[in-house]
Image: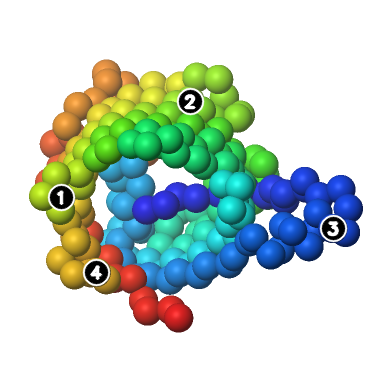
Amino acid sequence: MKTLTKAIAIASLVSASALTAQVANAEMSYSAGIATGYLWRGTELGSGVPAFSASADYSHASGAYAGIWASSGDTSLGNEYDLYVGYGTSFGDFSVDVQAVTYVYSSGTDSDTGADTYGSAGEMSDAIISLGFMDASFSYYQSLQSDDATYMTLGYSVAGVDLTVGINDDGAGAEYTHLDVSYGLTDELAITVSKVVDTGDDAAALSDWGVDAGEDAIVTMSYTLPIE
């Protein structure tokens, strides 16, 4: 899942010649897929409703990139689109990526006050840094709206299986850890099994996130649509 995200534009050109060079070394890529549910940080956001997603990405030879990712399937906040911009590079077996994302939802209103919540770019955003070494990875998400809201992942790939441990803390009592196990059955078809394995003490805050460590594991199938 990508979750993806934020209203941002790249502005790094200072002349017509620079623009020509940028375009000559840039490329666009597109993707689309469908999944049996919307799995996000170890929780099911769509109550088992299938989710369709698509993305468009711009990348430059320098390592800079930007894009948009959109998805259906969130039964609470509605359809989502994420805007993001970032930079990635590698040094041998090491890689580093920094990114800013913003998440925007079609039904992003407060159920009590009716006020706009997460319905505009910049209202829910993360700064992300990701590090990789061979088959291992680490990512750290820092909310740009709350200094206390963070999310971290540790990942490792072995024998075609991707293992991910995610630790979420919303800064308001919802603290939990989940484990995801993903396997690509084919180049297009993948299965993910996700389970919350540890929670904090604030049951009410966790319930708002739909988190219950006693629930069964979430199983999601996803299929990447062929796009030439």
Query: What number is the disc on residue 149?
Result: 2
Q: Earlier in the sequence, mark 4 or mark 2?
A: 2
Residue position marked by numbered label 3 in the rendering: 17
User: Distance from label 1 to label 4 (Cα)?
Assistant: 13 Å
Query: What number is the disc on residue 187?
Result: 4
Q: Position of residue 196 (x, y in %)?
A: 20, 36
Assign a secondary structure to mark 4. loop
Tell me whether circle 4 and circle 3 mark residues in contact (CB < 8 Å). no
Q: Is residue 210 above or below residue 57?
A: above
Tell me the amino acid under the disc marked 2.
Answer: Ala
User: Distance from label 3 to label 2 (Cα)?
Assistant: 42 Å
Q: Colour scheme used in the picture?
A: rainbow
**Which quarter of the figure has residue 57?**
bottom right
**Which quarter of the figure has residue 132?**
top left
Badge 4: few (under 14), some or many (20 or more) residues near its Cα, within 10 Å? few
User: Disc 3 or disc 2, which is closer to the eye?
Assistant: 3
Q: Position of residue 137 (x, y in %)?
A: 31, 35
User: Distance from label 2 to label 1 (Cα)?
Assistant: 29 Å
- Residue under the image location 24 percent in, 69 percent down: 187
Figure quadrant of the C terminus: bottom left
Residue position marked by numbered label 1 in the rendering: 161
Tell me whether circle 1 and circle 4 mark residues in contact (CB < 8 Å). no
Tell me the amino acid under the disc marked 1.
Answer: Val
